[in-house]
Image (tube, grey):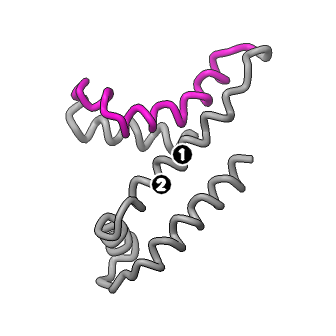
Amino acid sequence: SVFFAAEYFVRWYSVSLRPAYLVKPSALVDLISFLPLFVQMIGSSDTPSLQFLRLLRVLRLQRYLQDLNEFRKFYVEGLGVEATVRPYQLEIARVASSLFTLVFIA
């Protein structure tokens, strides 16, 4: 959660701390995904658990897996090599990211 919060604030800083960034749908999903960390830090021991909100992290990963072009850009930038990306690789990445998130959130 700390990593997600740091990334959120770095991205906000990269757009010159413009308030318009905070109301973008992707920024709201990002905010809600690490909000339980701050609620637990501020709240007392009887604060209700907000762990279910961490499932929104799936949405963060899924934005790179929307279509083949976005996945190709993510793939090339992540590996740093030019490669041919096939549709079945996109499907495998979707399944893997969903499973990864469910395993580590549970």
**What percent of the width, then of the height, locates residue 77?**
33, 70
CA–CA distance in space, label 2 to label 1:
7 Å
Tell me if residue 37 is in the magenta stretch. Answer: yes
Q: Is residue 89 left or right of residue 49?
A: left
- Residue type, label 1: Arg
Residue at screen point 47% across, 54% down = 61
Q: Do the CB atoms of the residues marked 2 and 1 lie less than 8 Å apart?
A: yes
Tell me if residue 80 is in the magenta stretch. Answer: no
Label annotation for residue 85: none
Q: Is residue 49 left or right of residue 22?
A: right
**What percent of the width, then of the height, locates residue 16?**
20, 33
Crowding at dot 2, Cα within 10 Å, few <14 / some 14-19 / many 20+, comes out as: some
- Residue type, label 2: Leu
**What percent of the width, then of the height, locates residue 72?**
33, 72
Label annotation for residue 57: 1
Eyeballing the image, is 21 above or below 62? above
**What percent of the width, then of the height, locates residue 41?**
65, 23
Q: Quadrant of the N terminus?
A: top right
Residue sitting nearer the eye, 81 or 90: 90
Residue 18, image quadrant:
top left
Q: Main secondary structure of the magenta part?
A: helix
- Tell me the element at label 2: helix
What segment carries the magenta color?
Answer: 18-44
Q: Which residue is mark 2?
A: 61
